[in-house]
Amino acid sequence: MLHATGPLCSVDVGDRTSRRIEIDDVLRRTVGGRALATALAHDRIPFDADPFGPENRAYLSTGPLQQSQMSFTGRMNMTGLSPLSDGLASTNAGGYLSRNFVATGISACEFVGESDELLAIHVTDEGVSFEEVPELEGATVPECSDYVADEHGLGPEHCIAIGPAGENLVRFASVMTFDSRAFGRGGLGAVLGSKNIKVVTFDGDADPDVTVPDVQREIHREAATSDDRMKRQGTTGGTEFINDNFSLPTRYFQEYEFEDAASIGGNAVEEKKYEKGACSACAYACKLPTRDEETGLETEGPEFETVYSFGSLQGVGDIVDVMKGNDLCDRLGMDTISAGVTVAAYLASEDEFGNADLAHEITEKIAYREGIGDDLAEGVARVHDQLGVDDYTVKGVEFAAHDGRVLHGQGLSYAVANRGGDHMYAGMLSLEYSGQLDPEGTLGKAEQLVARENYAAFRDSGVVCSFGSDYVTDERLEVLFDADYDDLMAVGAATVGRERHFNNKRGIDAEDDELPYELPDLEEAIQEYYDARGLNDDGTVPSETIETVAPTAD
């Protein structure tokens, strides 16, 4: 089976040392990306670790396809113990970092310990160096990129960075790369902040020995020549369809459709788009560099999730206001979903829906933990009682746009997902939107849910962009990775199992597999899922099914 190559680079910021650890056997078992990082996290982070403690570890990891020039491979994975969900979380980001990461000769980088000074860390094919950067305290993400360019001659495609939100331990702080691409969900930016890591750069000349089959050329050619709305409007292209036919959660989940959906949807975004945008080596070019000529505001996006979180959910119907919310989160380093939902909860408590200026003010206050922002920085699950609003989260993670109250299979997915209210964990929504699966009802969907979770986990291990599924078909996956499809899915299943087992050891079980709203037969459907996944009746993983594969921590 094709897999990533290279050692684990373990960086201890407490004593400012690093070492490279051979993990060939782990790579053969896990392929790379999310599966690799999950195995390392499961075996090297103590089950009782504090998410903000020095014993937590954050992992950046790449897959074998980042050692090709194939479209849909300009992404990387990041994994750690989440301060938002209190369980393992993996998230991935696009941009241009992955090839520069691979050029350092490693397959994964681990950050552990806690520095007493704010640090920039520089990883190359020759080693790791540490730089104290007190002048970057409070710096925005673009200011970090400017510093790295001025002082080290490296562009934002070589960097990850956190903004003020990460430094201030906002529980949904993101790790940013290329200024506007986010390792968004789960708050891993706050994990780096707790370690006093402000910036990490990657640069080198290593040339890993991985041969990717020629089918990559067919995929790349088809990506370049295809013509579909995603290239023009990104994920916002479906906004009006979802609003008209399913649900676009509105005014903090009080309503199911938004009267101004057309003003913030795909056409509105496309009108603001001023050039093409892509990720590394990708000919699909579905990114959304946008500009408002009147105000001079430039940002990338918003994508659909931000149109929901800073638009309909806040009762805001002006695309420029949504763009500003998107830009604030990118510069300050926050997940637009969790930030937007949390701000919407505040607007609900104040009866201020539609007040975009207040929404932007509160967004900034969250990043700096100023005033009410200090409470909101904890996330909806920890502040909803104080606000007097319902807790629209699962396992502490704010909901994505795709409404489980209407898409019942997606609702079931939210309930059991190790990552909480995250639409990417299984993607049942695509089956229900397309009509392949009746959105009504939860029973009888468990087998498909397990299959979707396994597929997503493997996709994030390869690493393959989710937008490439029409091009990187199941048959092509077998050719690319030189393995039967069932063997690939077994890697995904093992990854989901390790995530859940780690969370079980932290006390997360069937009581946490729940929703803040009722769905038909949900309890029975969850039991169907447990049976399909081979879990115990209490939602725990049988310990004998979990194998330790990674070198244990010192």
Image (tube, rainbow, N blue to C red):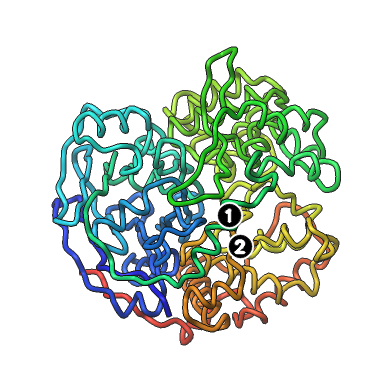
If the image is split into quadrants, where does the C terminus sit? Answer: bottom left
Residue at position x 64%, y 47% in the image: 400
For residue 471, the mark is 2
Q: In this orientation, does residue 512 appear?
A: no
Q: Is residue 507 left or right of residue 242?
A: left
Crowd tier of the residue under label 2, counting other residues whose Cα lies within 10 Å: few below 14, some 14–19, many 20 or above: some
Residue 252 sits in quarter: top right
Q: Report x, y in % for residue 296.
A: 53, 16
- The three-letter amino acid code for the residue at tag 2 is Tyr
Residue 394 sits in quarter: bottom right
- The three-letter amino acid code for the residue at tag 1 is Ala
| In the image, residue 61 above or below residue 196 | below
Q: Report x, y in % for residue 547.
A: 40, 83
Cα separation between marks 1 and 2: 7 Å
Residue at position x 74%, y 44% in the image: 238
Q: Is residue 320 left or right of residue 444?
A: left
Residue at position x 48%, y 43% in the image: 172
Q: Is residue 79 left or right of residue 362?
A: left
Name the residue beneath numbered marker 1.
Answer: 223
Q: Nearer the viewer, residue 543 or 278?
A: 278
Crowd tier of the residue under label 1, counting other residues whose Cα lies within 10 Å: few below 14, some 14–19, many 20 or above: many
Q: Report x, y in % for residue 274.
A: 57, 27
Q: Indicate which disc, 1 or 2, sits on the residue closer to the N terminus.
A: 1
Q: Are marks 1 and 2 in contact (CB under 8 Å)?
A: yes
| In the image, residue 296 above or below residue 533 | above
Q: Nearer the viewer, residue 58 or 158?
A: 158
Q: Report x, y in % for residue 95.
A: 44, 45
